Amino acid sequence: MKTKTRKYASAFVGACCFTLAGPVAAQDPISPPRVLEIPDEAPVVEAQQRAEPFTMSVRILGQNRELWAGDLAMSASNRAQVRIDVQDSDIGCPVENDRFAERRNAVEFQVRRGYGRNSARYTVETNWTRPTASCAEQGSLATGFEVQVELDKGETRVIEGDGGLRVELTRR
């Protein structure tokens, strides 16, 4: 019984090999890769890629308290970011409760060229984490936004978010 099975299996495998070998041999030769011609003239460069570097003045406020302010050097192809984490004491807490007298404010800010062909469009992302309340035992509140703004040279834009978060941008 084993001999018959081997004969049939060998015949089947042999038939498959001949079937596969036939069409492969009959195929057209492999065509060479195409060579693309590049025009002699320089490609068109978008306005934002030709733009000169500049300074963007940034002021970040939280509930009318300045969290960070400064100038950031920008160009059309880079981004600028600021990350700060401030811990200090809440002087409004009673001395006997000094375990919870610490307050923490964290700010993350990023500005980068926005989408589209407009060289004055920027994406601004800001997040702010702060204590829940004065002398709070634990917990924190967070707010933030990501928006696109148009900001030409000399213009100022103000972006307001929840919880008193405010960002002022001036392109110099």
Image (cartoon, rainbow, N blue to C red):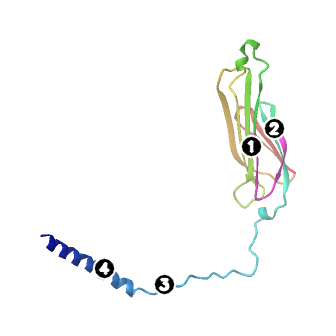
Q: Secondary structure at mark 3?
A: loop
* Three-letter amino acid code of the residue under disc 1: Phe
Question: Residue sitting at 80 percent across and 57 percent down?
Answer: 75
Residue receiving disc 2: 68
Q: Quadrant of the N terminus?
A: bottom left
Task: Name the amino acid type tagged 2.
Answer: Trp
Q: Which residue is mark 1?
A: 109
Q: Is residue 146 left or right of residue 66?
A: left
Disc 4 marks which amino acid?
Cys
Does the magenta run of residues contain 79? yes
Residue 138, how many percent across, how many down?
65, 23
Distance (Cα) linking label 2 and label 3: 63 Å
Q: Which residue is mark 4?
A: 17
Place of residue 20 in the rendered image (x, y in percent of width and height, measured from the top left): 33, 80
- Tell me: 133 left or right of 156: left
Which amino acid type is marked by label 3? Answer: Ile
Distance CA(mark 3)–CA(mark 1) = 54 Å
Please give the count of numbered marks on the rendered protein: 4
